[in-house]
């Protein structure tokens, strides 16, 4: 994950930062608010890579950051993953991965583990657990979309950063049930890891189904630049208060 260019360093973490160990998905919390902004890291990454963003993503009052940890090891022991992602076996005509007709074996277990974590927070936080904003970067965005479009998990908004479409027929069946859900989607036009076109198509599909889509294409690659953080802050100010 490439970090935004305008990061503020020297961040002081609040006393609400800690590890939760039940259910099996661990997570870092930053802040003490009762309502969560849950962000899932990408493939071969870690929850710690979100930490600099706590200085640039502006949380609405009463929220906290929650950064879960993927259950699998990343490539060559680097970082963590949500499942063993094999992009090379699914290359499309443009030379980039096309997972739209694929259902990876590890996707559903990853989604279940995150849902279990959300249930744990709901038990702890009471009504505050109803107001979850769920999202992620790259593989984490795939898991977030899987939860949104293949479950009835209660979500206030969805954030998809450099995602791609996975198992499109099954997602389409669940999209209609999310009519009115605010969704933020950002993707770089020159991304050579996951195709820009898939995110653009997903944004159109969601908007056509009546979801409230904020689509942020940008000139860049597989990253989260400062302009995306700025747009995300405006989205959260409107939809996550």
Image (cartoon, rainbow, N blue to C red):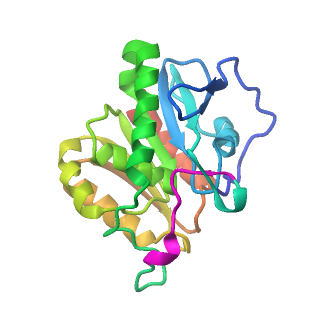
Residue sitting nearer the eye, 201 or 143: 143
Q: Is residue 157 above or below residue 193?
A: above
- Residue at image point 67% right, 57% down: 2
Q: Is residue 173 magenta?
A: no
Which quadrant would residue 129 be assigned to in this image?
top left
The reply, left or right, for residue 238 in relation to residue 169 is right
- Residue at image point 71% right, 56% down: 77
The reply, left or right, for residue 210 in relation to residue 221 is left
Q: Is residue 83 magenta?
A: yes
Q: Is residue 113 above or below residue 128?
A: below
The N terminus appears in which quarter of the rendering? Answer: bottom right
Q: What range is drawn magenta here? A: 79-90
Q: Is residue 6 above or below residue 156?
A: below
The C terminus appears in which quarter of the rendering? Answer: top left
Residue 49 image offset from top left, x and y in percent = 68, 46
Which quadrant would residue 196 be assigned to in this image?
bottom left
The reply, left or right, for residue 35 in relation to residue 28 is left
Residue 160 image offset from top left, x and y in percent = 44, 51
Residue 18 image offset from top left, x and y in percent = 66, 24
Residue 190 image offset from top left, x and y in percent = 55, 74
- Residue at image point 24% right, 57% down: 170
């Amino acid at each position: 994950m490439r970090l935004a260019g305008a990061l503020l360093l020297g961040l002081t973490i609040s006393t609400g930062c800690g590890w939760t160990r039940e259910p099996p998905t661990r997570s870092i919390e930053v802040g003490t608010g009762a309502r969560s902004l849950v962000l899932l890291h990408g493939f071969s990454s870690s929850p710690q890579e979100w930490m600099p963003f706590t200085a640039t993503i502006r949380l609405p009052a009463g929220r906290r950051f929650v950064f879960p940890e993927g259950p699998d090891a990343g490539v060559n022991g680097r970082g963590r993953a949500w499942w063993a992602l094999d992009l090379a076996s699914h290359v499309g005509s443009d030379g980039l991965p096309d997972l739209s007709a694929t259902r990876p074996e590890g996707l559903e277990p990853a989604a279940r583990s995150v849902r279990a974590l959300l249930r744990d927070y709901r038990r702890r936080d009471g009504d505050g657990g109803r107001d979850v904003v769920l999202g992620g970067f790259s593989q984490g965005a795939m898991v977030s979309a899987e939860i949104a479009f293949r479950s009835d998990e209660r979500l206030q908004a969805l954030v998809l950063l450099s995602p791609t479409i996975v198992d499109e027929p099954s997602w389409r069946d669940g999209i209609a049930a999310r009519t009115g859900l605010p969704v933020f989607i950002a993707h770089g036009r020159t991304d050579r890891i996951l195709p820009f076109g898939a995110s653009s198509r997903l944004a159109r599909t969601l908007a056509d189904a009546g979801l409230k889509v904020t689509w942020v294409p940008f000139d860049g690659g597989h990253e989260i630049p400062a302009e995306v953080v700025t747009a995300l802050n405006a989205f959260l100010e409107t939809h996550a208060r």
